[in-house]
Image (cartoon, helix red, strand yellow):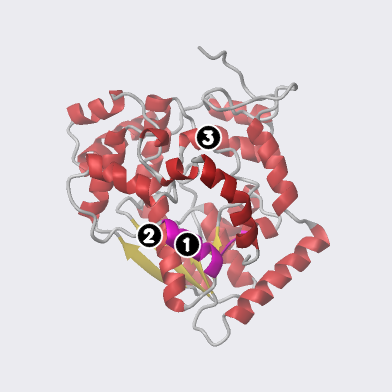
Amino acid sequence: MTEYRMCKRCVMDTSDPEITFDKNGVCNHCHTYDRLVREHIVDGEAGRQRLEKLVADIKRAGQGKQYDCVIGVSGGVDSTYVAYLVKKLGLRPLALHLDNGWDSELAVKNIEETLKRLEIDLYTEVLDWEEFRDIQSAFLKASTPDSEIPTDHAIVAILGNMAAKLGVKYILIGNNVRTETHLPSAWSEGHFDWKYIRELHKRFGTRPLKTFPHFGFFTYYMRMITQKRIAILDYVHYTKKEALRVLQEELGWRYYGGKHYESIYTRFYQGYILPVKFGYDKRRCHLSSLICSGEMTREQALEELEIPTYSPSMQEEDREYVAKKLGFSDEEFNTVMNAPKRSYWDYPSYGHFMEQPIIQAMIPSVKKVMALFQ
């Protein structure tokens, strides 16, 4: 059994089965954070100039079109702040929202209110609920710790599809280095891997997927060439505290209690299924990133980890609601919770293909070619 250890800089620990520590007790995730900051974050005058150039490029590419970029909105902090920022920069975005059947009432109100005040057009893609319920149930039955992957994959698909339809080159996303760098791959892997998603559904699903938004291997790489996904929050001094103040004071946005808790399923999955079944508390990732960015101290993060992920009474309400909505009886849901734990690598995927020695040998050359199109 692995000896329990926690990083001396952040709060990541050996609940990540692949975590490593240096001689000073600092984890690999903190080193990754430092590297990504060096590679992607540019502050001060250089950062201002880079942002100006980006905005000019987006406007130039969007000339003569109804929109010059597309953005995804979930109702959460990061995506809503992206909407606020791009409007402030004078861009003409189309906002896309994926309705997978789990939006909280507050998330819907946040989206409607903020986009109304920002005068941004909204397109909502509503998933076929019976199909999505089947694929989401399949992921739970597969017993892997990544049941949010179908939603994440579909979001990337609809953003790419809409950008292609509109002839828009730029997709601006809320992912950013400062607040989202400590997620272990063992906790969630295969977001872009349609083969993995398809194979899991074949094994554990019960109905064909006819309308589920997705993209395959070649489409993914072609869109890396023809479209640009920009993590625009890396181009500004983005902090959660300031973003919350701006959204609440200027856009009437209301807080919902946790990162990505704007979705009822996400709240239950991150706050109950992951910690209870797998021993993964995703707050460790989020808090660790904020420690490294200087937004909070390690002591504050440790204090937050001492309290429940969210109200135990609400967890029980969510447990009953989620099980019923997905069509599980209490006994079936308990079976899912007690099933042996699996991982991304236990199922067929493009990942297995990419791990072949001949493919690994080709990757550096492919990256050089791809870089020419960036």
Residues at circles 2 and 1 in contact by the CB criterion of under 8 Å: yes
Magenta residues span 217-232
Q: Is residue 151 something that shows in the picture?
A: yes
Query: Can you give x and y, in whole percent of width and height, for residue 373 in the image?
Result: 62, 67
59 vs 39, nearest the viewer? 39
Residues at circles 1 and 3 in contact by the CB criterion of under 8 Å: no
Total tally of numbered discs in the picture: 3
Q: Could you say which quadrant of the image residue 250 lies in?
A: bottom right
139 vs 87, nearest the viewer? 139
Tell me the distance, in whole angstroms, between the alpha carbons under discs 2 and 3.
24 Å
Instruction: Determine crowd level at label 1: few under 14, some 14-19, many 20+ residues with C-alpha closer than 10 A.
Output: many
Q: Which mark is residue 98?
A: 2
Residues at circles 2 and 3 in contact by the CB criterion of under 8 Å: no
Q: Which residue is mark 1?
A: 72
Circle 2 — which element? strand
Query: Can you give x and y, in whole percent of width and height, for residue 13 in the image?
Result: 58, 24
Q: Residue at x 37, y 38 (%)?
A: 268
Residue found farthest to the front: 358
Question: Could you tell whether 190 is left or right of 175 in the image?
Answer: left
Q: Residue at x 32, y 23 (%)?
A: 340
Q: Residue at x 34, y 47 (%)?
A: 197
Q: Which mark is residue 283?
A: 3
Instruction: Determine crowd level at label 3: few under 14, some 14-19, many 20+ residues with C-alpha closer than 10 A.
Output: many
Mark 3: amino acid: Arg
Question: Could you tell whether 58 is left or right of 330 in the image?
Answer: right
Q: Which mark is residue 62?
A: none
Circle 3 — which element? helix
